[in-house]
């Protein structure tokens, strides 16, 4: 099992990945080859039409991060973002209206039209 900085990852599912999202993330990793010891950071930042926006990038682990391994992918969550992302599913959609990662958040009480920001 993958560990970063010797910390054992959590096995529960704070977040979930669809098979399609996992496949796309693996393709990005093979294409871009992020640095060794980094993981996929999912986060929430203030902003957007509805108040909070999703963030997703590759990053080194920080001291208080939640570390989760799903489908062989190491996911990093800062404690503040973990509160807002608990129970989300990250999907990847490819269709006539565009393609990209989609956060399916059961905690969101309002989502903007583009799906990039939300309110809880």
Image (tube, grey):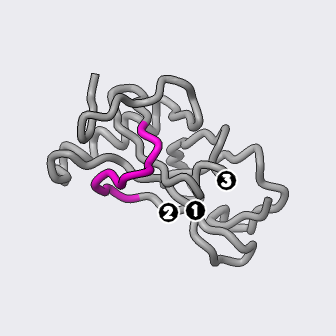
Q: Is residue 61 magenta?
A: yes
Q: The residue tagged with tag 3: helix, strand or loop?
A: helix
Q: Nearer the viewer, mark 3 or mark 2?
A: 3
Instruction: Kindly check if marks 3 and 1 are in contact, taking CB atoms under 8 A apart as contact.
Output: yes
Point 67% across, 53% down: residue = 84
Which percent across, then down, holds residue 91?
A: 54, 42
Q: The residue tagged with tag 1: helix, strand or loop?
A: strand
Point 46% across, 29% down: residue = 10
Give the magenta-colored segment's residue range. Answer: 57-67
- Other-residue count near label 2 (Cα within 10 Å), few / some / many at <14 / 14–19 / ≥20: few
- Other-residue count near label 1 (Cα within 10 Å), few / some / many at <14 / 14–19 / ≥20: many
Which percent across, then down, holds residue 24?
A: 37, 42
Q: Earlier in the sequence, mark 1 or mark 2?
A: 1
Report the residue marked by disc 2: 55
Report the residue marked by disc 3: 84
**In screen coordinates, is 9 left or right of 51?**
left
Between 9 and 116, the one lying in front of the other is 9
Instruction: Kindly check if marks 1 and 2 are in contact, taking CB atoms under 8 A apart as contact.
Output: yes
Quadrant in which the C terminus is drawn: bottom right
């Amino acid at each position: 099992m993958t560990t970063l900085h010797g910390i054992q990852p959590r096995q529960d599912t704070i977040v979930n990945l669809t098979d399609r999202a996992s496949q796309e993330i693996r393709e990005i990793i093979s294409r871009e080859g992020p640095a060794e010891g980094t993981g996929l950071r999912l986060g929430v930042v203030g902003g957007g039409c509805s108040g909070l926006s999703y963030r997703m990038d590759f990053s080194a682990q920080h001291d208080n991060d939640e570390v989760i391994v799903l489908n062989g992918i190491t996911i990093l969550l800062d404690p503040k973002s973990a509160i807002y992302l608990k129970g989300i599913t990250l999907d990847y959609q490819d269709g006539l209206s565009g393609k990209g990662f989609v956060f399916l958040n059961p905690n969101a009480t309002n989502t903007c039209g583009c799906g990039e920001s939300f309110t809880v």
